[in-house]
Structures are given as C-alpha cells and as structure tokens.
Image (cartoon, helix red, strand yellow):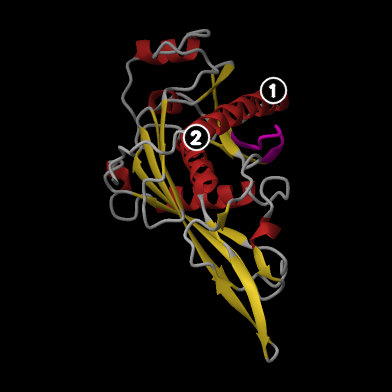
Amino acid sequence: MAEILLSEAEKAFIHHGDDLRCDGRTRLDYRPIILETGLVSNASGSSRLRLANSDVLVGVKVELASPLSEKPLEGRLEFFVDCSANATPEFEGRGGEDLANEICRFLQMSYMSGDTINLSELSVLAGQQCWVLYVDILILECGGNLYDTVSLAVKSALYTTQIPSIKVATMDGDQPELELSEDPYDTKRLNTQNVPCLVTLMKIGNHYLVDPTPEEECCSSSGVVVAVSGSKKITAVRKIGSGSLHPESLVSMLKTASEVGAVVNKILMKKLLEEETAGKTQKVGFMR
C-alpha cells in the first residue's frame, strides 16, 4: 500500500500508546462492521461487508463440473479477487493484481483443511459430477485490514448460498441423467459453522494489535494473518512484512489470534442468524 505521511508525534503515539489507539480502541478491538446479505439477485449467495473504510462485495455462483481426479468424491471452491481501481489509486491498471493473487492463495490454503467445510456434500455423482462454488470477491474500497474484511464477507456469502437440489434419474444406457429441481426454493445449504475467519495481527514496537488501520500498517514492519475456524482451530498462517518476529512473540500472537478468531466467528454467525430470521425485511443495499 502507499506510504501514508505521518508526523513524528503520530508515529510516537502509535508506537507507545500503551493500550489506547488513535481511534480510541484497545489493541484487541475491531472497528465497526456493517453487513448485508442477499444483495445480488442473480448469484446463489452474496454479501457486502464494510469494516470501517474497507468495503468488500462477494458473490457466489454454483455450477456443475467434473471433480478433480485426486478428489473424486468432493466438490470444490474457487476464489477470484478483483481490486477495483476506485478502491485506491494504487489499484489502477494492474496495480492490484499481486494483492488479489495473495488473498486468493491464502483463502484457498485456509479452506484446505477438512475441518472447515465438508466438500463431500458438493458431490453429485462420485467421480463424474460435483458442484463447484465460484466465489467472486470485489474490493470496492481499501481502508486497512483487507484480509479480515474479505474473509468475513466470504463466510457471510457462503452462509447464504443456496445449492439447487438434484436427483439422479433413470439410467439411459450406462449414463445416468441428472434432474434439476424446478422449484427455486428446493435447495440445500452448506454448514459454514467452521468456515475460517482471518485475523490479522500487526507488531508495533513491543506489542501487537488486531484490525490495523492504514496508519498502523505503515508503522509496522511485521505481522501475521491467521485463519481461525469456528472451533478455534488454526488452519493457515501467513507472515507479512519485511521484519522479523521472535518465536515467543509468534506463539503469543497465534494464541491471541485463535481466541479473537473464535469470538469473531461466534458474533458473525449470530448476526447472520438474526438477519436470516428477520429475512422478510426489505433490503436496502445499493444493489437493490
């Protein structure tokens, strides 16, 4: 990201502000989050999540395809990230490609654990047909802590994703025929309880903090992004920044990330359930 100009006094406060940050938060507090689901009418599932000034829109498309040869009994998820040129001047042209690829790779790694999502539920015909969930992520605005924002939006979109019911009809020769239900409400959903949320911790001075602002990111030379499932299991870790981390600091950061991630997962699932229960209310998102 572009370097943000900070005065020496601002840098000193960020480095030595004890447990008080520039916006009044403590080190383990998140900024306000606004969530809406079901905004994209032609997607199987969608969400828009705003974490302070970071804004992300996610749409999920469900399609039939052949399973991977090494996993014939499972479906799969494929992630695509697009960094809008309006999000930040740095994304103009091909400026956001590296960041988009990094987020894609880390999401794929985070979901590889069998404890996060049961991909066998996406199998239709063993070794022949399966559901593939194409998760399209559009970064509308960049205001710091993109990894966490993207992961929360992805989990919300997957929670709302409706997978059509399909039946194997009578055999035509040796080839089975698939019958897709014509009832738009005859669908199933994946269990997303253990879908991971990403928690970013940045090391600043002798302490670390979650949900860094762009100013705090500029004052940090190292940090970690940790994927934490709903059961507090860490499924992936990525080191960010050019600085080093002491082994004791890394262990402490991973422990904190696991605890924070479990709380974030719990709060997000509660919010999604509330929105689903209230689901009759009219959507007010920009896509409606």
Q: Position of residue 48 (x, y in %)?
A: 39, 41
* Residue at numbered disc 2: 277
Residue 55 falls in image quadrant: top left
Q: Nearer the viewer, residue 276 or 36?
A: 276
Q: What residue did someone put label 1 on? A: 252
Q: Quadrant of the N terminus?
A: top left
Q: Is residue 118 above or below residue 206?
A: below
Res 223 seen here: no
Tell which residue pokes out farthest to the bottom in this image. 173
Dot 1 amino acid type:
Ser
Query: Is residue 155 shown left or right of residue 232?
Result: left
N-terminal-most mark, 1 or 2: 1
- The quadrant of the rendering that contains the C terminus is top left
Q: CA distance from mark 1 to mark 2?
A: 38 Å
| Magenta-colored span | 225-235
Q: Amino acid at mark 2?
A: Thr
- Considering only vertical position in the picture, is 31 above or below 235? above
